[in-house]
Amino acid sequence: MIAGAARVAAADTLELPALGARATARSGAAMLAVDDGVALLLDPASLARRSTPRVTAGLAAVRQTATFTSDASFPAGSAPPVDSRPPVLLRPWGGGAFGIGDRVVVGAAVFAPTSAHHRYASPAGDFDPTKDDRALFPQRYGGERLVLERWGAGAGAAVLVLPWLAVGAAALVHRTELAHELMIWAGPPETAGLQLGDLSPAFDMRFRASASAWSPGASVGLVIAPLDVPVEIGLGATWSAPAQLSGEPRLTDSRGVTAGVREAVAGVDPDATAELELPAPFTTRAGLRLLFGRLALELDGELAFVSGAPAWELRGVSVTPSGQPTVELLRVPLGPALRERMAVRAAVDVELVPGVVALLGGYAFTGRRVEDDSVTPVWPDADSHTLSLGVEARVAAATVTLGVLHEFRPARHPGDSRLRVIDPRGDLVVRAATGESESAVTLVALDAEIAFE
């Protein structure tokens, strides 16, 4: 079952590596080991493990870093690496569950499955020919800023159909918020070469768009726990509708000024719109858990099916190059070409003091989530490795869990990138960003659960 159904995803492919402290401590391998609100996303049937009323609250601190090293040639020489170093972000979550009789358990939770922030230094003010900033900001046509947030809530129920079989289902809703920023180039095509170094920053125009949307989802699952056999099996699936984002676009005049006249002037109507459909995957999961007294091992696999190349569809945005006709700016790609994603996760729980203190650990490998030739500095998605460690302490009716996780994506060169510098006329064939991207996520999560016996 694990081999046939392995991999995970969310509607944006930049989701956090795990939700909740217990899942964080286990590198996300929590399909069978978690029976709190996180189960609504992974396998709602796991709620049936306990009918005891309980509430859980948690807080995660997220630090994301990324580095882009351009291999393009510039008049000022080679470009130094540029870094995205957003601040540490705090993401709360909470949930509760209670039993109705001996066979039914219902639960609800709020959570933040996605929190992706990337922001690189960018040129400010008018272009100064004596300070050519092409090599200092080589990422600007591939992306300067990306903020992608998803907040969610869910409610569901699990039923103990037989002593060894539980089934569950949950209804989900997500709020997706997206902000995107990059440079477009509005210079005369005949003055441009075929390399980034040939494009004068005097014709740079900063494009911004932000939008938000609500979208529904659902999850189902089952848990099989044969009597008198130390093995548990879980199966689950999650569906999410695409996020139909609708918001506002912004475009600034070009940075260059010649004889008091801008090289290009932006036109944005008061009722201008920016719309984008962010595809969501259909995700299947399978898990296997082995119980050996004070030791428990879990192996989870997930597979997500998704495809698409999201792009802003614009209305009411135009560019007027100096001395030339006005051109409508109709489409700005977000960057990535989304595709299937796979993940395999393994975790171990060790009871140091039975019923009181447990040590948790895990490892995960996540396969490709975007096509190689569509990686950008603000969308550095790639194969990743995750290592984690945690500790759980139980005192009376309270359980406190601390998990620490580090996910890293080694440097990857996108090769012959399909991403081009955005030109309102559509004449350029210059690649937007060539070089290597690497990134990492560090997650520290703390949960507290109170059970009411």
Image: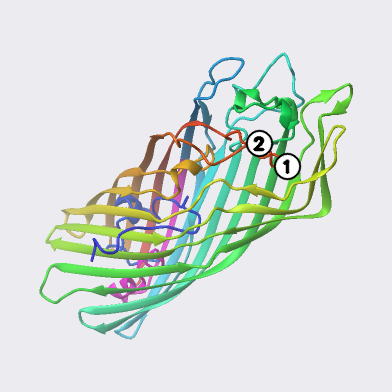
Residue at mark 2: 428
Q: Is residue 124 magenta?
A: no
Which residue is at a point 49% across and 59% down the rendered structure image?
11
CA separation in Å, label 2 and label 1: 9 Å
Observer-side mark, 2 or 1, equals 2
Residue 374 seen anywhere in this rendered image of the structure: yes
- What is the number of the mark on residue 276? none
Decide if residue 330 is on the left or right side of residue 304.
Answer: right
Residue 235 location, x and y as percent?
29, 70
**Residue 136's image quarter?**
top right
Residue 349 location, x and y as percent?
21, 54
Which residue is at a point 59% across and 21% down the rendered structure image?
135
Quadrant location of the N terminus in the rendered image = bottom left
**Residue 40's image quarter?**
bottom left
Neighbour tally class for label 2: few under 14, some 14-19, many 20 plus, Cα within 10 Å: many
Residue at mark 1: 424
Q: Nearer the viewer, residue 106 or 204?
A: 204
Q: Secondary structure at mark 1?
A: loop
Magenta residues span 38-63
The number of numbered badges drawn on the structure is 2
Q: Amino acid at mark 1?
A: Pro
